[in-house]
Amino acid sequence: MALSTIFWIQLLGIIFGLGMMYFTFVKYKRKELNKTEFLVWFGGWILLALVAIKPSALDFISGHLKFYRRLDFFVVVGFFVLLGLGFFNYSTVKKLEKKLEVYVRKEAIEEANLQRAKESNK
């Protein structure tokens, strides 16, 4: 008996969710994530695994939003999540760029002042 495509998608979703739970835990233990970040990400991976096990659990939401297929609902939600994460990453990188620029300018000014002080002492 051949296994259905739905079974393989569910199995891959569960494996992916479990793998990401493991990586999230490792990052938390390495102190790369704080407790809040760990709980949010870990909860998200648990939710992903649960939805992979029982996709019909979201029918009450997708039904009210008039999605006729679960896949349509997942694609739309996934698109919104990716856009949100992309914007968050972009804004974080911009903030880090500004901090780095301020730091580099400060270091350059200090280095120039040290050079001038050395040259004036000669």
Image (cartoon, rainbow, N blue to C red):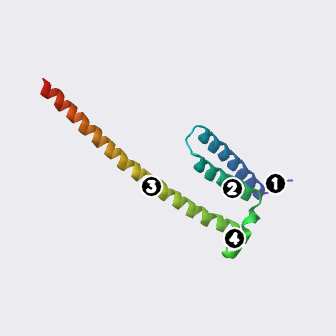
Residue closest to the far right: 1
Q: Which residue is mark 1?
A: 3
Mark 4 or 1 closer to N-term?
A: 1
Tell me whether the residue at label 4 lies in contact with that at label 2, contact meaning CB atoms closer than 8 angstroms. no
Tell me which corner region of the image, top left, top right, bottom left or bottom right, holds residue 31.
Answer: top right
Residue at x 83%, y 53% (from the top left corner): 2
N-term-proximal mark, 1 vs 2: 1
Amino acid of disc 2: Leu
Q: Amino acid at mark 4?
A: Ile
Could you say whether the residue bearing mark 1 is in a helix, strand or loop? Answer: loop
Residue at the image point whose x is 74% and y is 62% from the top: 55
Q: Which mark is residue 52?
A: none
Left or right of 53: which side holds 121?
left
Q: Earlier in the sequence, mark 3 or mark 1?
A: 1
Rendering coords of residue 88 (x, y %): 48, 56
Q: Secondary structure at mark 4?
A: helix
Q: CA distance from mark 3 to mark 4?
A: 30 Å
- x and y percentages locating residue 81 in the rendered image: 57, 61
Q: Is residue 73 left or right of residue 94?
A: right
Among the two numbered marks 4 and 2 on one chain, the one whose residue lies closer to the N terminus: 2
- Cα distance in 3D space between marks 3 and 1: 42 Å
Q: Which mark is residue 61?
A: 4
Q: Earlier in the sequence, mark 3 or mark 4?
A: 4
Q: Secondary structure at mark 2?
A: helix
Q: Would you call the spot at circle 4 few (<14 residues within 10 Å), some (14-19), or many (20 or more)?
A: few
Amino acid type, label 1: Leu
